[in-house]
């Protein structure tokens, strides 16, 4: 069986994390998100994979290449030139799939790879037109909800239904298997009110007009997460770090304490007085310490520096520096960021309520009691900067010394506190 992965989207809700990379290339424990999927598909016996790409597709192509050299699978690419919806994206796979069933999934998912084997086995047993994975959710109004009949076949698909409709809580988990009949359904699909060809509409056409059957497969005991919102990366990061093995490839000086499963990459130097609690992953060519405190569920990329500072449950991408008396908690720091001495992230409200984040102009409740900052690539902060819970700092911005960041900062901004006039915002003159 072949696999098709949709990886063309821009990931607007993940900004500024996706300002410099497509969603599938967000790193977790030294590998991009998409690599975990490809390795899982390979383990399930799938060796031919098509990637539907678009936004910053060069990054994906450069990293994965033809697939044979790095992963011993064959990877092909098709560019989705216009973003006309998921149905439109899937239609590109018709010539690749030809007349065989195929596994289809979104490229921003991370899941226990055992799911792939289970659904392949289930599909081969039933010989039906399609299979859709489902997940029980507590907030069905935020998902596409699938209604099943008594035989577990899809009966109806409703996007973000109001709770009063009482349509259940089985959400579309974004992993499917179809035979080529789905392409006939896509050809019959018309644009939605959003001006897109919706794949859910195509599935309903398959059922109602072509008399096809789609089996619902409920994911019960396996990890699954879509990475649609910035804080969802923490769950994915925890899933990956819980499965790493302890391996120390770098140089660890005397008087360093390392507990639990900790990976330390080649040419990384952990200096005296540092204290590291696993699970955590530290990449290559990185300097840790002296006297650094790295707490569980921290990922530090390559060519970083974590100095006399504390980092907890955070993702720090490559070439970033947290060097002097900094605190980074429950935060995501993108590549090539430099925190000035004494700069800190706040990750807890005084009232202990969950932190809300501005996503495309709307405050969204993260559901997380502890949540820090999201700092885009190439950001610099001056000394003693404080960043409040859930705030985002856009790429290529500079935060002036002694500034309290109580709002999101737009990209390419010089943001600083004037002692006479308060907060000032200007275009970054250095970028």
Image (spheres, rainbow, N blue to C red):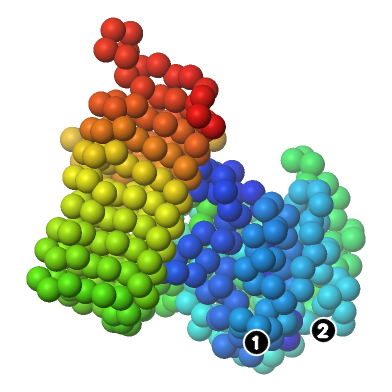
Q: Is residue 339 left or right of residue 393?
A: left
Q: Is residue 175 left or right of residue 229?
A: right
Q: Is residue 280 left or right of residue 72?
A: left
Characterize the local packing of mark 1: few (<14), some (14-19) or many (20 or more) Cα atoms within 10 angstroms: few
* Residue in front for this viewpoint, 310 or 8: 310
- Secondary structure at badge 1 equals loop
Residue 32 shows in this picture: yes
Characterize the local packing of mark 2: few (<14), some (14-19) or many (20 or more) Cα atoms within 10 angstroms: few
Up-down: is 17 above or below 199? Answer: above
> Residue 161 location in percent, x, y?
58, 48
Task: Find residue 202 and report its image quarter.
Answer: bottom right
* Residue in front for this viewpoint, 7 or 135: 7
- Secondary structure at badge 2 equals loop
> Residue 383 location in percent, x, y?
26, 33
* Residue topped by disc 2: 100
* Residue in front for this viewpoint, 207 or 420: 420
In the rendered structure, find residue 72 and report the number of the disc placed on it.
1
Up-down: is 33 above or below 115? Answer: above
Up-down: is 410 above or below 197? Answer: above
Up-down: is 50 above or below 374? Answer: below
Cα gap from disc 1 to disc 2, whole angstroms: 21 Å
Which mark lies nearer to you, 1 or 2? 1
Residue at the image position 23 percent from the left and 33 percent from the top: 384
């Amino acid at each position: 069986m072949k696999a098709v992965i949709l990886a063309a989207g821009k990931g607007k809700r993940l900004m500024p994390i996706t300002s410099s990379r497509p969603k599938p290339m967000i790193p977790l424990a030294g590998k991009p998100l998409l690599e975990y999927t490809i390795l899982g598909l390979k383990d399930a016996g799938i060796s031919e994979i098509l990637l539907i790409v678009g936004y910053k597709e060069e990054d994906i192509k450069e990293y994965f290449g033809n697939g044979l050299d790095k992963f011993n699978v064959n990877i092909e690419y098709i560019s989705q030139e216009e973003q006309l919806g998921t149905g439109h994206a899937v239609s590109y796979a018709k010539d690749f799939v030809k007349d065989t069933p195929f596994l289809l999934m979104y490229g921003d998912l991370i899941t226990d790879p055992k799911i792939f084997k289970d659904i392949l086995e289930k599909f081969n047993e039933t010989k039906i037109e399609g299979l859709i994975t489902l997940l029980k959710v507590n907030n069905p109004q935020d998902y596409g909800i699938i209604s099943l009949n008594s035989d577990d076949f899809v009966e109806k698909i409703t996007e973000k239904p109001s709770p009063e409709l009482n349509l259940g809580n089985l959400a579309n988990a974004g992993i499917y298997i179809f035979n080529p009949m789905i392409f006939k359904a896509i050809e019959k699909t018309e644009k939605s009110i959003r001006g897109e060809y919706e794949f859910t509409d195509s599935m309903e056409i398959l059922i109602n007009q072509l008399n096809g059957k789609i089996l619902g497969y409920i994911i019960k005991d396996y990890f699954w997460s879509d990475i649609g919102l910035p804080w969802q990366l923490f769950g994915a990061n925890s899933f990956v770090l819980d499965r790493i093995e302890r391996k120390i490839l770098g140089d660890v000086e005397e008087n360093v304490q390392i507990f639990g499963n900790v990976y330390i990459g080649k040419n990384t130097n952990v200096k005296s007085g540092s204290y590291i609690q696993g699970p955590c992953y530290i990449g290559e060519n990185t300097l840790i310490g002296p006297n650094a405190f790295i707490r569980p569920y921290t990922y530090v990329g390559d060519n970083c520096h974590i100095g006399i500072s504390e980092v907890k449950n955070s993702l720090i991408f490559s070439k970033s520096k947290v060097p002097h008396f900094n605190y980074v908690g429950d935060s995501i720091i993108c590549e090539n960021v430099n925190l000035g001495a004494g700069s800190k992230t706040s990750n807890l409200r005084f009232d202990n309520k969950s932190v809300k984040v501005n996503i495309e102009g709307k405050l969204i409740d993260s559901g997380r009691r502890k949540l820090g900052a999201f700092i885009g690539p190439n950001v610099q902060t001056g000394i003693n900067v404080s960043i409040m819970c859930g705030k985002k700092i856009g790429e290529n911005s500079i935060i002036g010394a002694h500034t309290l960041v109580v709002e999101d900062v737009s990209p390419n901004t010089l943001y600083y506190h004037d002692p006479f006039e308060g907060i000032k915002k200007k275009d970054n003159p250095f970028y």
